[in-house]
Image (spheres, helix red, strand yellow):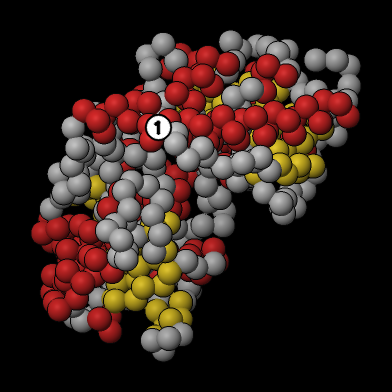
Amino acid sequence: MNGGPMKILFVHQNFPGQYKHLAPALAARPDREVVALMLGKKPPVVPGVRVVPYQVARGNSPDVHPWLLDFESQILRGEAAARAAAALDREGFAPDVICAHPAWGEALFLKDLWPRAKLLCFWEFYYRARGADMGFDPEFPASGWEDNARVRAKNAGNLLSLEAADWGLSPTVWQRAQFPDWAKPRISVIHDGIATHEVRPNPGAGLRLEQAKVELKPGDEVVTFVNRNLEPYRGYHSFMRALPEILRRRPRARALIVGGNDVSYGARPPAGQTWKQRFLDEVKDSLDLSRVHFLGKIPYHFFVALLQVSAVHVYLSYPFVLSWSMLEAMSAGCLVVGSRTPPVEEVIAHGENGLLVDFFQPGEIATTVIEALAEPARFQALRAEARRTVVERYDLNTVCLPRQIALVEAVAAGLIP
């Protein structure tokens, strides 16, 4: 680095994304100059950060091989980001360290422009044909070697970025474990961080469901289920199959279901359908629909209140990226009934800070939720331990953000690797 301020470039297609807290924290220091690149036309306002949007020049080629579609998209985005970076370079901005989420390709060519800059990549997921999400759910099986080949080809951008990166960061041990053995020693594990001072138990919380004219409070039999989108990857089908028995056995219980109708991960449903409606239709004749509340996508303050009134929070996931929502539920003091899958087991120990169930057994899910609703006092210690786990291991301000800042500074200074 020169004698001036440390220059930091953030690169994320949907900035700020995982850099929501890190970028402004670094920008708040007087000896830092922080710039961000993002795809789009309307950059967000992030205190202290100059956000530079860029556009992709064209779409995918009509005759590109389907296994190359993702990689071509990454090349196009990488080129666009590099051209935007070159404009910054002409202005005199040359970063000491680049913090980039490489999944969409934006980081591919930045070291070609700035070979002296240190590149710190956020490694969210490495695709595997076996042992992770692919082939996990027998209801949606892989189609054979062709699917395996397609998934392996999806790592082309990952592998080029791994070669270019000076260091990496993964949020969980399990996510790092998906990467090749030769890459793991250059990946630190630091979670994005949970704002436990905001997401916390509140005995006085209340939640009003306007359409149903229902007021809910802590102590009510509220079963919560939260996805970005309601889909198999996050166990929506297993939850819906468990729900009729839960509501039958607990006539005062209500299910509050949060999530959109699109697809975030995995395959799309048949044309003209949504996963939400497909699995609701499967069980709706056995449900008291007056006690099932689909809330769609909700504001964050409403989400926090929802967790604060929850009696049982159900979180199910394929072996895949762990959702912030599970940790936020624990931070709010929820009793989490989670799937016995590796990302969840990294955080929840059965009978200590939550309860684990078989992802594929709606009967077990239902029985566990029913037991928890019937005897809330018996599980109070688990709720307290859930919050303690998140405060001690994942708190934003005291654990994760200081470690992230220290890592950026160490990489920028050449102290690692």
Q: Is residue 364 above or below residue 182?
A: below
Residue 105 percent coordinates (x, y): 56, 31
Q: Quadrant of residue 98?
A: top right
Task: Tally the numbered discs.
Answer: 1
Q: Is residue 77 above or below residue 375?
A: above
Q: Furthest-front residue in view? A: 63
Determine whether, in the image, residue 9 is placed left or right of residue 153.
right
Residue nearest the viewer, comparing 298 with 371: 298
Judging from the image, what secondary structure is the residue with disc 1 in? loop
Q: Position of residue 410 (x, y in %)?
A: 66, 18
- Horizontal side of residue 195 vs 342, given as left or right: right
Q: Is residue 214 above or below residue 390?
A: below
Residue at position x 77%, y 24% in the image:
95
User: In which quarter of the view is residue 257 placed?
Assistant: bottom left
**x then y, percent, for residue 102:** 55, 31
Give how far across and how far down residue 73 sits, in percent: 52, 36
Does residue 177 appear left or right of residue 58 in this picture?
left
Pick the residue in front: 247 or 374.
Answer: 247
Say which residue appears at 16% left-offset and 49% top-offset: 139
In the image, 113 versus 368, the foreground residue is 113
Instruction: Specify whether 12 is left or right of 159.
Output: right
Residue designated by label 1: 65
* Residue 412 visible from this viewpoint: no
| Quadrant assignment, res 127 | top left
Crowding around mark 1 (Cα neighbors within 10 Å: few <14, some 14 to 19, many 20+) is few
Instruction: Identify the residue at horizontal 39%, vertical 64% (top origin).
Output: 261
**In percent of the image, x 41 and y 51: which residue is there?**
264
Residue type at the position of mark 1: His
Q: Inspect this view and state whether residue 386 appears.
A: yes
Q: Dividing the image into 4 quarters, which one contains the C terminus?
A: top right
Quadrant in which the N terminus is drawn? top right
Depth check: give the residue in front, 198 or 20: 20
